[in-house]
Image (cartoon, rainbow, N blue to C red):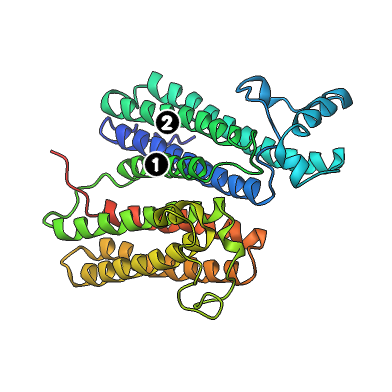
Amino acid sequence: MFYVQTAPISAAARPATAERAVGLWLLALAGMVLVQVMLGAITRLTDSGLSIMEWRPIMGAIPPLSDAEWQRVFALYQQIAEYHQVNAGMTLDGFMSIFWWEYFHRLWGRLIGVAFAVPFLWFWLRGHVRGERALRLLGIFALGGLQGLMGWIMVASGFADRTDVSQYRLVAHLLLALVIYGALLWSALDLLYPNAVDKGQWMLRRHGWIMMAVITLEIAIGGFVAGLDGGLVYNNFPMMGEHWIAPDLFFLSPWWINVFENPVTAQFLHRLAAGFVAIALIWLVVRARRSDLAPHLKRRFYYLPFGLLGQAAIGIATLMLVVPLPLAVAHQAGAFILFSLGLFALHGVRRARP
């Protein structure tokens, strides 16, 4: 008989293998956050967000299991303005159809917490996550807990005299999700692409972060468009009705409140900011092409125009078709994907650590 003795993994190889495992775990978590963002979009577009009027972080994972419990939660919903002004006469079956979207949105958030905590504990016990890295990940976990609280604060804003949630809290909820997503993705890239980076690219790096700031601003404005139902007005492009600039852009007083309260202004600013995103992105790609970056790092920047074109096409189609659910969800996911492509490109020109 012949025996083949495999060489043991060297001590130098073990950390790289462990770092890859941690990186893939963080990348999977970022994917779960993206799914949660899409579920949140469905919840908002189906007017399901106010269907659960109790915040029970632990016991809320169990849905109603009896007719009596279903009647109890439906009776709570019947007390708010949305039921009386929007869904008056809704049957229990109709209520259940919106309840499940909000339930799955909250349940997925709980699953993200479990998918973070259990592997983190395992990696920590194995010594793969320690020191600064452990503190950073615990900070992201704390942001996840804050996001759950922010979600409830947002939902609670619709329990009084409103028929929907506050657009201000909606945008805060969306941007906090973006921060968590970005932190997870960047941490994953640190582990999956740990090699030394090109030096001397500070101009490219500064331009890239300006582009990311404009993309983030565009996502925030998109949140106001969603919160104000701004996609339901002026459903033609590139003009707004028969005008390039809608005549009712600043009909509220004082004028600056239109930015946050007027759906027409929110949509106009969303269109305008999209143009600034395009300018910043295309200029960045041109500068990257002319730079002395390594070819594999240049390729990261070449993905950006495809993300931009796809997002623009979906956004225009969503507007002109009056916000169909699949396209609206794809448009929100596309914003996060474009944000991801920007982070991936910038990670290749990050500052080298000592």
Res 297 → quadrant = bottom left
Image spot of residue 155 (x, y percent): 60, 35
Q: Residue at x 72, y 35 (%)?
A: 80
On the question of residue 201 being in view, the answer is no
Kind of residue indicated by mark 2:
Leu
Image spot of residue 255 (x, y percent): 41, 57
Measured in 3D between alpha carbons, the distance from the residue under mark 1 to the one under mark 2, in whole angstroms, is 9 Å
In the image as oriented, which residue stretches furthest toward the front?
253
Mark closer to the chain start, 1 or 2: 2
Res 112 → quadrant = top right
Quarter of the figure that contains the C terminus: top left
Q: Residue at x 16, y 40 (%)?
A: 353
277 vs 137, nearest the viewer: 277
182 vs 235, nearest the viewer: 235
> Would you say 15 lies left or right of 108 here?
left
Image spot of residue 60 (x, y percent): 67, 24
On the question of residue 233 being in view, the answer is yes
Element at badge 1?
helix
Q: Give the residue pinned by disc 2.
A: 143
Kind of residue indicated by mark 1:
Val
Element at badge 2?
helix
- Rendered view: 44 above or below 338: above
> Would you say 163 lies left or right of 314 here?
right
Q: Residue at x 62, y 63 (%)?
A: 232
Q: Residue at x 38, y 22 (%)?
A: 124
**Label pair 1/2, CB-CB below 8 angstroms:** yes
Callout 1: few (<14), some (14-19), or many (20+) C-alpha neighbours within 10 Å?
Answer: some
Q: Give the residue pinned by disc 1.
A: 179
In the image as oriented, which residue stretches furthest toward the bottom?
242
295 vs 146, nearest the viewer: 146
